């Protein structure tokens, strides 16, 4: 979501005549798009801001520094910026991105600092001006914000209430992307399964219906989506995944914790059994489905038995990959006030324990691909070796392969896997699909 906001901001700047700089420290206008989902990102923001101030004070390249994203969306940070970082030229939030060109122009023409943060939960930004990071795969927002208020999470406070984009706007954007060479889209939302709820009745369709509509777009090869909240994934979505040939055999379904009592405390609205039922259904309908997830370790009150439940889910589902996070206290969320916080050393020990299981299973899953031929969308050359191409399979595996050349970038090819690694697959080109 944050990456796609950056694409939108870059697109606006390009329309205004700016050109992307290779090195942010050499840029005249710097836009710091911030994240605040965990404390680490929060800290990095202040560090970076200090570095840009130094360059600006020394009159080295940097002239204008803008700050946007989830950090300034919080009242505490707004106060901090006004008090300690009042030199920042332009500040805007997650819901005022569309104002950025005007704010920047006003800053330049009037010399006055600009500050525009609102919590207007009804804004659905215009997405036309996005500057895509990749030509062949694109992120496409379908919803903004979140209504779920998981007790650890700051997103509903920084991104506002859930709003759905009109299906006609989504389809038009994807059609235009495809005309310009996009082969793969990822439909984005904090909870894609609740898509459509805020739409006018005459336009309202479900996420499953949206998948079926996007699947009809000619020239599009692949559809991905994230994130699916387990409490809202319907049988219709699983059936649409099964029926739509363009929807990739990959499901990112965060479970956070294996213990049903911890899930209740997190306000996730499903139990361990509910979650495993969904996985079983999905495996039954789409036998070749790959899974990934988000796991949180160290939520307040977590016991060793709770960690065993988390490990048990990992063993039962056998994820191809997983994002593992150590719980980070976010001011303003209900969990931050819970009294049974877990000590840092205990969190780290548990985290290592879970990570070991996750990594072992990822390696075992990858080993199963030995000798198989996979369709790969080529993204570029390997960082380590120009003669090796790299791309993603439909299962979202990174595949590095020999036997191809740079003309294949952005194309679909068939690769035979000869050397599966823990976190990627190595192989050889078999066929070039035009
Ligand atoms: N909407 C998505 C998640 C978006 S945030 C969903 O519900 O699945 C991405 C991930 O960050 C979450 O799944 C969670 O695992 C992690 N996360 C969110 N808040 C966190 C916190 N306070 N500490 C640690 N991890 C957190
Ligand atoms: Fe955060 Fe929960 Fe919303 Fe995901 S569903 S963004 S974890 S509140």
Image (spheres, rainbow, N blue to C red):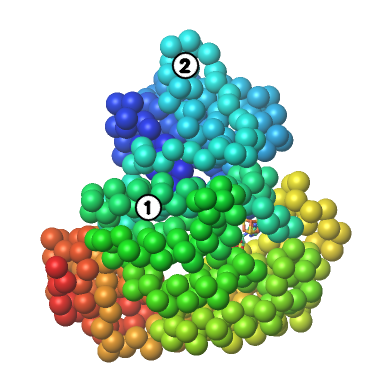
303 is higher (above) or lower (below) than 342: below
| Quadrant field for ligand 2 | bottom right
Outermost top residue: 110
x then y, percent, for residue 407: 13, 60
Q: Taking 415 as reference, is 63 above or below it?
A: above
Q: Is mark 1 on a helix, strand or loop?
A: helix
Q: Where is residue 299 in the image (x, y as percent from the top left)?
A: 73, 65
Q: Quadrant of residue 413?
A: bottom left
Disc ID at residue 202: none
Q: Do the residues labelled 1 and 2 touch (CB within 8 Å)?
A: no
Q: Which residue is drawn at 47% across and 16% down?
A: 106
Query: In percent of the image, x 74 and y 47: which residue is there?
Result: 331
Tell whether 416 sits left or right of 351.
Answer: left
* Residue hosting label 2: 106
Label 1 Cα neighbours within 10 Å, binned few <14 / some 14-19 / many ≥20:
some
- The residue lying at 47 percent from left, 32 percent from top is 98
* SS at badge 2: helix
Whether residue 321 is visible here, answered yes or no, is no
Specify the label residue 171 is tagged with.
Answer: 1
Would the CB of label 2 be found within 8 Å of ligand 2? no
């Amino acid at each position: 979501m944050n990456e796609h906001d950056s694409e939108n901001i870059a697109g606006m700047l390009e329309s205004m005549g700016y050109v992307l700089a290779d090195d942010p420290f050499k840029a005249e206008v710097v836009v710091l798009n911030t994240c605040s989902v965990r404390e680490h990102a929060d800290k990095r923001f202040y560090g970076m801001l200090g570095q840009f101030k130094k360059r600006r004070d020394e009159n080295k390249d940097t002239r204008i520094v803008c700050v946007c994203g989830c950090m300034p969306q919080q009242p505490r940070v707004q106060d901090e910026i006004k008090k300690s970082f009042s030199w920042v030229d332009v500040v805007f939030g997650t819901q005022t991105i569309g104002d950025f060109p005007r704010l920047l122009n006003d800053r330049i023409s009037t010399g006055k600092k600009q500050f525009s943060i609102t919590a207007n939960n009804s804004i659905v930004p215009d997405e036309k001006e996005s500057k895509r990071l990749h030509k062949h795969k694109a992120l496409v927002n379908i919803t903004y914000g979140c209504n779920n208020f998981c007790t650890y999470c700051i997103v509903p406070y920084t991104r506002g209430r859930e709003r759905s984009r009109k299906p006609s706007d989504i389809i038009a954007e994807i059609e235009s992307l495809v005309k310009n060479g996009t082969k793969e889209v990822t439909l984005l939302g904090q909870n894609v399964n609740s898509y459509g709820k805020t739409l006018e009745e005459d336009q309202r369709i479900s996420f499953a219906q949206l998948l079926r509509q996007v699947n009809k777009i000619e020239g599009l090869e692949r559809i991905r989506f994230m994130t699916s909240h387990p409490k809202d994934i319907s049988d219709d979505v699983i059936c649409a995944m099964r029926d739509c040939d363009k929807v990739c055999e990959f499901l990112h379904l965060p479970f956070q914790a294996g213990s049903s009592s911890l899930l209740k405390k997190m306000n996730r609205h499903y139990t361990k059994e509910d979650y495993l039922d969904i996985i079983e259904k999905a495996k039954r309908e789409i036998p070749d489905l790959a899974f990934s997830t988000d796991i949180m370790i160290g939520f307040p009150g977590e016991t060793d038995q709770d960690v065993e439940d988390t490990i048990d889910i990992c063993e039962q589902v056998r994820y191809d990959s997983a994002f593992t996070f150590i719980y980070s206290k976010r001011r303003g969320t209900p969990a931050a006030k819970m009294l049974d916080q877990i000590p840092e050393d205990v969190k780290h020990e548990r985290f290592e324990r879970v990570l070991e299981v996750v990594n072992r299973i990822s390696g075992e899953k990858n080993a199963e691909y030995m000798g198989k031929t996979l369709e790969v969308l080529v993204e570029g050359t390997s960082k380590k070796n120009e003669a090796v191409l790299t791309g993603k399979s439909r299962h979202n595996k990174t595949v590095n392969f020999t036997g191809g050349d740079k003309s294949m970038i952005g194309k679909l090819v068939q690769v035979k896997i000869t050397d599966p690694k823990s976190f990627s697959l190595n192989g050889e080109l078999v066929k070039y699909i035009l």
